[in-house]
Image: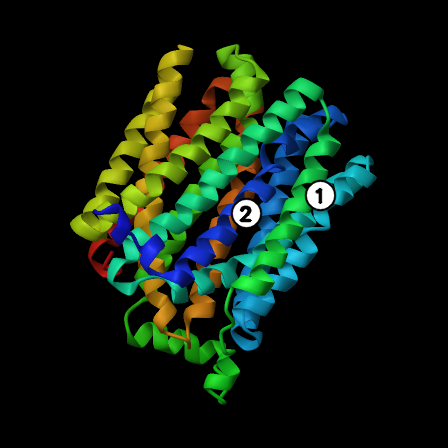
Amino acid sequence: MKFKESVLFTKKELRRFCTYRLLFGISYSLMIPIIPLFYKSIGLSTVIIGIIISLYGLSKTITQIPFGIFADKIGDKLALTLALGLMALVPIGYTLVKNNILSGSIYVIQGAILGMAAPSTYSILARSIDKRKRGESTGLASAVFTFGGGVGAIIAGIIVTKLNDFNRVFYISSFGILLTLIYVIFKIPKEKPARQVNKSKVSLKEILKEINIYKLKHKIIMLGAMAFLGDYIYSCVVALIHFYGQSVLGVSTLYTSSIISVYLIVFGLGAPIAGWVSDRIGNKAQLVLSFSVMNLSLLGLVIIRNVSVFTITIIIYFLGATFLNAALQGSLSEFGSNPRIKGFVFGFVGSSESFGYALGPLISSYVYEINKEWLFLGLLIVSLLITALYVLFYNKSKI
Protein backbone atom coordinates (compact mmCIF):
# COMPACT_ATOMS: atom_id res chain seq x y z
CA MET A 1 0.00 0.00 0.00
CA LYS A 2 1.54 3.30 -1.14
CA PHE A 3 1.36 5.92 1.59
CA LYS A 4 0.13 8.71 -0.70
CA GLU A 5 -2.69 6.48 -1.96
CA SER A 6 -4.06 6.02 1.56
CA VAL A 7 -7.73 6.95 1.94
CA LEU A 8 -6.63 9.42 4.60
CA PHE A 9 -5.22 11.58 1.77
CA THR A 10 -7.71 10.77 -0.99
CA LYS A 11 -10.97 11.09 0.99
CA LYS A 12 -11.49 14.52 2.60
CA GLU A 13 -14.62 13.47 4.53
CA LEU A 14 -12.77 10.57 6.15
CA ARG A 15 -9.81 12.80 7.02
CA ARG A 16 -12.12 15.23 8.83
CA PHE A 17 -13.88 12.38 10.63
CA CYS A 18 -10.52 10.97 11.75
CA THR A 19 -9.47 14.38 13.08
CA TYR A 20 -12.67 14.55 15.14
CA ARG A 21 -12.05 11.04 16.50
CA LEU A 22 -8.44 11.85 17.37
CA LEU A 23 -9.42 14.97 19.30
CA PHE A 24 -12.22 13.18 21.12
CA GLY A 25 -10.06 10.12 21.76
CA ILE A 26 -7.41 12.17 23.56
CA SER A 27 -9.88 14.31 25.50
CA TYR A 28 -12.33 11.62 26.58
CA SER A 29 -9.70 9.00 27.39
CA LEU A 30 -8.02 11.30 29.87
CA MET A 31 -10.83 10.27 32.24
CA ILE A 32 -11.04 6.53 31.56
CA PRO A 33 -7.93 5.08 33.28
CA ILE A 34 -8.18 7.29 36.36
CA ILE A 35 -11.87 6.76 37.19
CA PRO A 36 -11.28 3.54 39.24
CA LEU A 37 -8.40 5.25 41.08
CA PHE A 38 -10.53 8.36 41.65
CA TYR A 39 -13.29 6.27 43.21
CA LYS A 40 -10.75 4.36 45.29
CA SER A 41 -9.41 7.68 46.58
CA ILE A 42 -12.84 8.67 47.91
CA GLY A 43 -13.25 5.35 49.73
CA LEU A 44 -15.20 3.06 47.39
CA SER A 45 -14.58 -0.72 47.42
CA THR A 46 -13.58 -2.79 44.38
CA VAL A 47 -17.07 -4.33 44.08
CA ILE A 48 -18.81 -0.94 44.25
CA ILE A 49 -16.43 0.43 41.61
CA GLY A 50 -17.29 -2.56 39.42
CA ILE A 51 -21.03 -1.90 39.90
CA ILE A 52 -20.64 1.79 38.98
CA ILE A 53 -18.70 0.94 35.82
CA SER A 54 -21.37 -1.63 34.97
CA LEU A 55 -24.12 0.97 35.39
CA TYR A 56 -22.08 3.24 33.07
CA GLY A 57 -22.21 0.52 30.43
CA LEU A 58 -25.90 -0.14 31.09
CA SER A 59 -26.85 3.52 30.66
CA LYS A 60 -24.81 3.62 27.46
CA THR A 61 -26.69 0.53 26.27
CA ILE A 62 -30.14 1.95 26.95
CA THR A 63 -29.63 5.20 25.05
CA GLN A 64 -28.14 3.84 21.84
CA ILE A 65 -31.08 2.32 19.96
CA PRO A 66 -33.50 5.25 20.58
CA PHE A 67 -30.79 7.78 19.75
CA GLY A 68 -29.88 5.82 16.62
CA ILE A 69 -33.45 6.31 15.39
CA PHE A 70 -33.43 9.91 16.71
CA ALA A 71 -30.24 10.67 14.75
CA ASP A 72 -31.90 9.37 11.58
CA LYS A 73 -34.70 11.90 12.10
CA ILE A 74 -32.75 15.08 13.01
CA GLY A 75 -29.47 14.30 11.24
CA ASP A 76 -26.35 12.63 12.58
CA LYS A 77 -24.31 15.83 12.89
CA LEU A 78 -26.90 17.61 15.04
CA ALA A 79 -27.33 14.55 17.26
CA LEU A 80 -23.55 14.31 17.72
CA THR A 81 -23.26 18.02 18.46
CA LEU A 82 -25.88 17.76 21.22
CA ALA A 83 -24.09 14.78 22.78
CA LEU A 84 -20.67 16.47 22.71
CA GLY A 85 -22.09 19.63 24.27
CA LEU A 86 -23.41 17.61 27.20
CA MET A 87 -20.22 15.55 27.45
CA ALA A 88 -18.06 18.67 27.83
CA LEU A 89 -19.85 19.37 31.11
CA VAL A 90 -19.32 15.91 32.61
CA PRO A 91 -15.63 16.21 33.72
CA ILE A 92 -16.43 19.46 35.53
CA GLY A 93 -19.01 17.55 37.56
CA TYR A 94 -16.31 15.32 39.07
CA THR A 95 -14.45 18.37 40.35
CA LEU A 96 -17.54 19.78 42.06
CA VAL A 97 -18.91 16.63 43.71
CA LYS A 98 -17.11 14.49 46.28
CA ASN A 99 -20.13 12.59 47.60
CA ASN A 100 -19.83 8.88 46.75
CA ILE A 101 -23.36 8.44 45.41
CA LEU A 102 -23.34 11.64 43.35
CA SER A 103 -19.88 10.86 41.91
CA GLY A 104 -21.11 7.43 40.83
CA SER A 105 -24.21 9.02 39.31
CA ILE A 106 -22.06 11.31 37.16
CA TYR A 107 -20.28 8.31 35.65
CA VAL A 108 -23.64 6.69 34.86
CA ILE A 109 -24.79 9.92 33.15
CA GLN A 110 -21.48 9.98 31.27
CA GLY A 111 -22.24 6.53 29.87
CA ALA A 112 -25.71 7.61 28.74
CA ILE A 113 -24.29 10.64 26.91
CA LEU A 114 -21.63 8.52 25.22
CA GLY A 115 -24.43 6.19 24.13
CA MET A 116 -26.20 9.17 22.58
CA ALA A 117 -23.10 9.94 20.52
CA ALA A 118 -22.31 6.42 19.32
CA PRO A 119 -24.97 5.87 16.60
CA SER A 120 -24.27 9.32 15.09
CA THR A 121 -20.56 8.50 15.03
CA TYR A 122 -21.22 5.21 13.22
CA SER A 123 -23.50 7.01 10.77
CA ILE A 124 -20.99 9.76 9.95
CA LEU A 125 -18.26 7.16 9.49
CA ALA A 126 -20.47 5.09 7.16
CA ARG A 127 -20.97 8.08 4.83
CA SER A 128 -17.33 9.18 5.06
CA ILE A 129 -15.53 5.98 4.03
CA ASP A 130 -14.19 4.95 0.64
CA LYS A 131 -16.52 2.04 -0.18
CA ARG A 132 -13.80 0.40 -2.30
CA LYS A 133 -11.55 0.28 0.77
CA ARG A 134 -13.91 -0.39 3.67
CA GLY A 135 -11.35 -2.21 5.78
CA GLU A 136 -8.67 0.44 5.39
CA SER A 137 -11.16 3.27 6.00
CA THR A 138 -12.70 1.80 9.16
CA GLY A 139 -9.26 0.70 10.35
CA LEU A 140 -7.95 4.26 10.15
CA ALA A 141 -11.04 5.60 11.91
CA SER A 142 -10.54 3.13 14.77
CA ALA A 143 -6.81 3.80 14.81
CA VAL A 144 -6.93 7.53 15.39
CA PHE A 145 -9.49 7.22 18.19
CA THR A 146 -7.64 4.51 20.06
CA PHE A 147 -4.24 6.09 19.45
CA GLY A 148 -5.64 9.33 20.84
CA GLY A 149 -7.01 7.29 23.73
CA GLY A 150 -3.55 5.92 24.41
CA VAL A 151 -2.08 9.42 24.45
CA GLY A 152 -4.84 10.61 26.79
CA ALA A 153 -4.35 7.66 29.12
CA ILE A 154 -0.59 8.28 29.31
CA ILE A 155 -1.11 11.98 30.12
CA ALA A 156 -3.69 11.16 32.80
CA GLY A 157 -1.50 8.44 34.31
CA ILE A 158 1.50 10.78 34.56
CA ILE A 159 -0.53 13.62 36.14
CA VAL A 160 -2.16 11.37 38.74
CA THR A 161 1.03 9.39 39.51
CA LYS A 162 3.36 12.38 39.76
CA LEU A 163 1.00 15.12 41.02
CA ASN A 164 -1.86 13.12 42.54
CA ASP A 165 -4.19 15.71 40.99
CA PHE A 166 -7.45 14.27 39.59
CA ASN A 167 -9.05 17.69 39.08
CA ARG A 168 -6.37 18.81 36.65
CA VAL A 169 -7.10 15.79 34.46
CA PHE A 170 -10.83 16.53 34.51
CA TYR A 171 -10.31 20.19 33.55
CA ILE A 172 -8.07 19.25 30.60
CA SER A 173 -10.59 16.63 29.49
CA SER A 174 -13.47 19.12 29.54
CA PHE A 175 -11.49 21.69 27.56
CA GLY A 176 -10.50 19.06 24.98
CA ILE A 177 -14.09 17.89 24.47
CA LEU A 178 -15.17 21.53 24.02
CA LEU A 179 -12.53 21.95 21.28
CA THR A 180 -13.82 18.74 19.68
CA LEU A 181 -17.35 20.15 19.68
CA ILE A 182 -16.18 23.33 17.93
CA TYR A 183 -14.35 21.26 15.31
CA VAL A 184 -17.44 19.13 14.62
CA ILE A 185 -19.64 22.22 14.22
CA PHE A 186 -17.38 23.80 11.62
CA LYS A 187 -15.75 20.85 9.84
CA ILE A 188 -18.10 17.84 9.76
CA PRO A 189 -20.62 18.18 6.88
CA LYS A 190 -24.33 17.78 7.45
CA GLU A 191 -26.44 14.90 6.26
CA LYS A 192 -30.06 15.34 5.27
CA PRO A 193 -32.26 13.76 7.93
CA ALA A 194 -33.99 10.55 6.90
CA ARG A 195 -37.41 12.22 7.15
CA GLN A 196 -36.40 14.66 4.36
CA VAL A 197 -35.25 11.85 2.10
CA ASN A 198 -38.26 9.64 2.73
CA LYS A 199 -41.48 11.22 3.95
CA SER A 200 -42.97 7.95 5.19
CA LYS A 201 -42.14 6.99 8.75
CA VAL A 202 -40.39 3.63 9.08
CA SER A 203 -41.78 1.65 12.00
CA LEU A 204 -39.87 -0.87 14.08
CA LYS A 205 -42.05 -3.61 12.56
CA GLU A 206 -41.02 -2.55 9.04
CA ILE A 207 -37.36 -2.43 10.06
CA LEU A 208 -37.50 -5.98 11.42
CA LYS A 209 -39.39 -7.13 8.33
CA GLU A 210 -36.69 -5.74 6.04
CA ILE A 211 -34.00 -7.44 8.13
CA ASN A 212 -35.81 -10.76 7.71
CA ILE A 213 -36.37 -10.27 3.97
CA TYR A 214 -32.66 -9.75 3.33
CA LYS A 215 -31.68 -12.47 5.83
CA LEU A 216 -29.58 -10.14 7.93
CA LYS A 217 -30.69 -11.36 11.38
CA HIS A 218 -27.74 -13.70 12.05
CA LYS A 219 -25.24 -11.17 10.71
CA ILE A 220 -26.56 -8.41 12.98
CA ILE A 221 -26.61 -10.74 16.01
CA MET A 222 -23.02 -11.79 15.34
CA LEU A 223 -21.85 -8.19 14.93
CA GLY A 224 -23.52 -7.39 18.24
CA ALA A 225 -21.87 -10.40 19.90
CA MET A 226 -18.40 -9.36 18.72
CA ALA A 227 -18.99 -5.79 19.87
CA PHE A 228 -20.17 -7.18 23.23
CA LEU A 229 -16.99 -9.24 23.61
CA GLY A 230 -14.64 -6.37 22.83
CA ASP A 231 -16.08 -4.02 25.43
CA TYR A 232 -16.70 -6.80 27.98
CA ILE A 233 -12.97 -7.54 28.13
CA TYR A 234 -11.86 -3.92 27.77
CA SER A 235 -14.11 -2.78 30.63
CA CYS A 236 -12.73 -5.52 32.88
CA VAL A 237 -9.18 -4.45 32.10
CA VAL A 238 -10.00 -0.79 32.80
CA ALA A 239 -11.87 -1.57 36.02
CA LEU A 240 -9.59 -4.18 37.57
CA ILE A 241 -6.10 -4.14 36.02
CA HIS A 242 -4.86 -1.69 38.68
CA PHE A 243 -5.94 -4.00 41.48
CA TYR A 244 -4.93 -7.22 39.69
CA GLY A 245 -1.50 -5.78 38.93
CA GLN A 246 -0.87 -4.80 42.54
CA SER A 247 -2.18 -7.97 44.22
CA VAL A 248 -1.26 -10.71 41.71
CA LEU A 249 1.65 -9.34 39.65
CA GLY A 250 3.09 -7.04 42.32
CA VAL A 251 3.50 -4.05 39.98
CA SER A 252 2.97 -0.31 40.40
CA THR A 253 0.04 1.90 39.38
CA LEU A 254 2.22 3.45 36.68
CA TYR A 255 2.68 0.00 35.10
CA THR A 256 -1.05 -0.78 35.13
CA SER A 257 -1.89 2.67 33.71
CA SER A 258 0.65 1.95 31.00
CA ILE A 259 -1.11 -1.33 30.17
CA ILE A 260 -4.28 0.61 29.33
CA SER A 261 -2.24 3.08 27.26
CA VAL A 262 -0.44 0.26 25.46
CA TYR A 263 -3.78 -1.38 24.68
CA LEU A 264 -5.07 1.79 23.03
CA ILE A 265 -1.82 2.56 21.21
CA VAL A 266 -1.48 -1.01 19.88
CA PHE A 267 -5.11 -0.83 18.80
CA GLY A 268 -4.49 2.52 17.16
CA LEU A 269 -1.31 1.55 15.31
CA GLY A 270 -2.61 -1.90 14.37
CA ALA A 271 -6.10 -0.92 13.18
CA PRO A 272 -5.07 0.43 9.72
CA ILE A 273 -2.99 -2.70 9.10
CA ALA A 274 -5.86 -4.91 10.27
CA GLY A 275 -8.26 -3.06 7.99
CA TRP A 276 -5.89 -3.37 5.05
CA VAL A 277 -5.50 -7.10 5.71
CA SER A 278 -9.28 -7.63 5.93
CA ASP A 279 -9.69 -6.01 2.50
CA ARG A 280 -7.37 -8.68 1.10
CA ILE A 281 -8.09 -11.92 2.96
CA GLY A 282 -11.76 -11.27 3.75
CA ASN A 283 -13.60 -10.97 7.05
CA LYS A 284 -14.16 -14.71 7.53
CA ALA A 285 -10.47 -15.59 7.47
CA GLN A 286 -9.64 -12.60 9.66
CA LEU A 287 -12.25 -13.52 12.26
CA VAL A 288 -10.97 -17.10 12.52
CA LEU A 289 -7.44 -15.75 12.98
CA SER A 290 -8.57 -13.15 15.53
CA PHE A 291 -10.58 -15.53 17.71
CA SER A 292 -7.68 -18.02 17.72
CA VAL A 293 -5.12 -15.41 18.79
CA MET A 294 -7.41 -13.92 21.44
CA ASN A 295 -8.32 -17.25 23.03
CA LEU A 296 -4.76 -18.56 23.10
CA SER A 297 -3.38 -15.35 24.56
CA LEU A 298 -6.13 -15.22 27.22
CA LEU A 299 -5.24 -18.79 28.14
CA GLY A 300 -1.64 -17.62 28.57
CA LEU A 301 -2.73 -14.72 30.79
CA VAL A 302 -4.57 -17.18 33.05
CA ILE A 303 -1.28 -18.99 33.73
CA ILE A 304 1.49 -16.39 33.44
CA ARG A 305 2.77 -14.46 36.48
CA ASN A 306 6.13 -13.22 35.17
CA VAL A 307 5.67 -9.51 34.43
CA SER A 308 7.74 -9.43 31.21
CA VAL A 309 6.00 -12.47 29.71
CA PHE A 310 2.62 -11.14 30.90
CA THR A 311 3.28 -7.85 29.08
CA ILE A 312 4.17 -9.60 25.81
CA THR A 313 1.17 -11.92 26.05
CA ILE A 314 -1.36 -9.17 26.73
CA ILE A 315 0.01 -7.18 23.77
CA ILE A 316 -0.58 -10.25 21.58
CA TYR A 317 -4.15 -10.34 22.89
CA PHE A 318 -4.52 -6.63 22.04
CA LEU A 319 -3.43 -7.37 18.46
CA GLY A 320 -5.99 -10.17 18.16
CA ALA A 321 -8.72 -7.84 19.43
CA THR A 322 -7.59 -5.17 16.95
CA PHE A 323 -8.00 -7.52 14.00
CA LEU A 324 -11.41 -8.64 15.31
CA ASN A 325 -12.57 -5.04 15.55
CA ALA A 326 -11.40 -4.27 12.00
CA ALA A 327 -13.56 -7.08 10.63
CA LEU A 328 -16.48 -5.90 12.79
CA GLN A 329 -16.22 -2.26 11.65
CA GLY A 330 -15.85 -3.23 8.00
CA SER A 331 -18.99 -5.37 8.11
CA LEU A 332 -20.93 -2.78 10.08
CA SER A 333 -20.13 0.01 7.61
CA GLU A 334 -21.99 -1.92 4.89
CA PHE A 335 -25.27 -0.95 6.56
CA GLY A 336 -24.59 2.75 5.94
CA SER A 337 -26.06 2.41 2.44
CA ASN A 338 -29.44 1.29 3.83
CA PRO A 339 -31.13 4.36 5.37
CA ARG A 340 -34.22 2.39 6.46
CA ILE A 341 -32.41 0.13 8.92
CA LYS A 342 -29.00 1.70 9.54
CA GLY A 343 -30.05 3.65 12.65
CA PHE A 344 -31.51 0.52 14.24
CA VAL A 345 -28.47 -1.62 13.34
CA PHE A 346 -25.94 0.94 14.54
CA GLY A 347 -27.95 1.35 17.74
CA PHE A 348 -28.21 -2.41 18.29
CA VAL A 349 -24.50 -3.05 17.78
CA GLY A 350 -23.60 -0.06 19.92
CA SER A 351 -25.98 -1.24 22.63
CA SER A 352 -24.45 -4.72 22.54
CA GLU A 353 -21.01 -3.16 22.92
CA SER A 354 -22.22 -1.11 25.87
CA PHE A 355 -23.96 -4.09 27.44
CA GLY A 356 -20.60 -5.85 27.40
CA TYR A 357 -19.09 -2.82 29.13
CA ALA A 358 -21.90 -2.99 31.70
CA LEU A 359 -21.76 -6.71 32.40
CA GLY A 360 -17.99 -7.16 32.40
CA PRO A 361 -17.00 -5.23 35.54
CA LEU A 362 -20.10 -6.43 37.41
CA ILE A 363 -19.26 -10.12 36.95
CA SER A 364 -15.48 -9.76 37.05
CA SER A 365 -15.44 -7.71 40.26
CA TYR A 366 -17.30 -10.50 42.06
CA VAL A 367 -15.02 -13.13 40.51
CA TYR A 368 -12.02 -11.05 41.60
CA GLU A 369 -13.32 -10.86 45.16
CA ILE A 370 -13.71 -14.67 45.25
CA ASN A 371 -10.26 -15.36 43.80
CA LYS A 372 -7.99 -12.63 42.46
CA GLU A 373 -6.23 -15.06 40.12
CA TRP A 374 -9.44 -16.00 38.27
CA LEU A 375 -9.83 -12.65 36.47
CA PHE A 376 -8.48 -13.76 33.08
CA LEU A 377 -10.06 -17.21 33.39
CA GLY A 378 -13.46 -15.52 33.44
CA LEU A 379 -12.54 -13.46 30.36
CA LEU A 380 -11.39 -16.58 28.52
CA ILE A 381 -14.71 -18.34 29.19
CA VAL A 382 -16.69 -15.43 27.74
CA SER A 383 -14.41 -15.27 24.69
CA LEU A 384 -14.88 -18.99 24.08
CA LEU A 385 -18.66 -18.61 24.27
CA ILE A 386 -18.66 -15.86 21.60
CA THR A 387 -16.30 -17.98 19.49
CA ALA A 388 -18.76 -20.89 19.75
CA LEU A 389 -21.59 -18.57 18.62
CA TYR A 390 -19.53 -17.53 15.58
CA VAL A 391 -18.95 -21.19 14.68
CA LEU A 392 -22.71 -21.82 15.04
CA PHE A 393 -23.60 -18.84 12.82
CA TYR A 394 -20.62 -19.27 10.48
CA ASN A 395 -22.64 -19.82 7.30
CA LYS A 396 -25.81 -17.90 8.16
CA SER A 397 -24.09 -14.69 9.29
CA LYS A 398 -22.16 -14.33 6.00
CA ILE A 399 -19.18 -12.68 7.72
N-terminal label among 2 and 1: 2
**370 vs 55: above or below:** above
Horizontal arrangement in the rendering, residue 126 relative to residue 59 (left or right): left
Q: Amino acid at mark 2?
A: Leu
Residue positioned 34% across, 48% down in the render: 139
Instruction: Give the Cα distance between marks 2 and 1.
Output: 16 Å
Give the color scheme: rainbow, by chain, secondary structure or one colour.
rainbow
Horizontal arrangement in the rendering, residue 95 relative to residue 149 (left or right): right
Residue positioned 61% across, 39% down in the render: 53
The mark found on residue 91 in the picture is 1
Horizontal arrangement in the rendering, residue 366 relative to residue 215 (left or right): right
Residue positioned 55% across, 28% down in the render: 154
Q: Residue furthest bottom?
A: 199
**Quarter of the rendering containing residue 63:** bottom right
Q: Residue furthest front?
A: 4
Horizontal arrangement in the rendering, residue 53 relative to residue 90 (left or right): left
Q: Amino acid at mark 1?
A: Pro
Q: Residue furthest left?
A: 281
Residue 26 in picture, x, y percent from top left: 55, 41
Count of numbered badges drawn on the protein: 2
Residue positioned 73% across, 24% down in the render: 41
The residue that disc 2 covers is 23
The answer to whether any part of residue 365 appears in the image is no
- Viewer-proximal residue among 176 and 113: 176
- Viewer-proximal residue among 306 and 88: 88
